[in-house]
Image: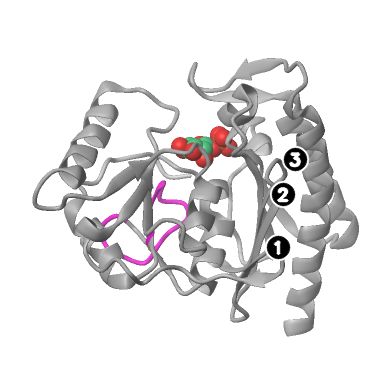
Amino acid sequence: GKDDLDLYHQEAINIAKIAGKLVRDAFYAEKNIDTKDHKTDLVTETDQETERIIKNHFKEKFPPHSFIGEESVAGGEKCNLTDNPTWIIDPIDGTTNFVHKFPFSCISIALAINKELVVGVVYNPTLDEMFSAIAGCGAKCNGKPIKASKNATEISQALLITEIGASREQDRINGIMDNLQKLVLEPYLARGVRALGSAALNMCFVAAGRADAYYEFGIHCWDVAAGIVIVKEAGGISLGAAGDPVDIMAREIVCAGSEVLCKKICSALTSIPHVRD
Ligand code: IPD
């Protein structure tokens, strides 16, 4: 019920603040950097420590709940979404930014129940912005309601956000560059394209009306789960690249302040295949 969701949301905010302090304290300190599948996919001790703290918090508060966490999956755990209440966690979304002291990283926490996303919390500790939403109750930034922009109905009126992502296979990069080129040239003529380095924060920027749309191929469920709730509750929409309902395991997302713009971007894009989460 609604009271349960309020409690889950509050606990997600509580632990995001605690985790945020950890990330903020580590931000300007010396870091031990490691890589994962790709040389360009970074991880630090803070990512792992932060995930541990968040998981332990929920394990203590809500023992029957399940988890999908970026670093647990990197450590060999299954990325399996069941009907059981499941916390989907990215302890630091924007790890490369974190490593380089670019102040655009966040803790991203979502809760899915019966595979429906019901709570989303995204906290940028360096800029102290807490984005959050409960399904059906609107989205907020630092406690104030936010609304996605409906101003752009054409790509030519839109400020877009996208990312290159971590893997650098030539075919994949060609696909990314072809899409980008198409969107910035006539007839689409996007007003601008930003690549800020955190999928979850990119989505919150769309939710807050600071950009009109964000799309990316190659993202993982933990990058976008919380953002999907926040964008939806701010009046925006998230879709798959073919304009189909968004599937968090499908490694692709297009979100926008309005459905018309979202669908126009989907139509313009050529899909880039990725192995599902
Ligand atoms: C990454 C960031 C980045 C996006 C990648 C993600 P991480 O997440 O969101 O913006 O381009 O696709 O994997 O690895 O920093 O948690």
Q: Which mark is residue 142?
A: 1
Viewer-nearest of discs 1 and 3? 1
Q: Is residue 120 left or right of residue 38?
A: right
* Amino acid type at mark 1: Asn
Q: Residue at x 34, y 58 (%)?
A: 240
Any part of residue 58 in sight: yes
Q: Is residue 87 magenta?
A: no
Q: Which mark is residue 162?
A: none
Q: Is residue 242 magenta?
A: yes
Q: Which of the two residues, 27 or 76, is positioned nearer the viewer here?
A: 27
* Residue at image mark 2: 128
Q: Position of residue 140 (x, y in %)?
A: 64, 68
Q: Earlier in the sequence, mark 1 or mark 3?
A: 3
Q: Check the image and report above or below for 27 versus 62.
A: above
Q: Residue at x 23, y 50 (%)?
A: 190
Task: Tell me if label 2 and label 1 are in contact, CB under 8 Å.
Answer: yes
Q: Check the image and report above or below for 163 versus 231.
A: above
Q: Which mark is residue 51?
A: 3
* SS category of the residue bearing label 2: loop
Q: Residue at x 59, y 58 (%)?
A: 226
Magenta stretch, main secondary structure, is loop
Q: Which of the two residues, 214 or 111, is positioned nearer the viewer here?
A: 214
Bounds of the magenta span? 241-255
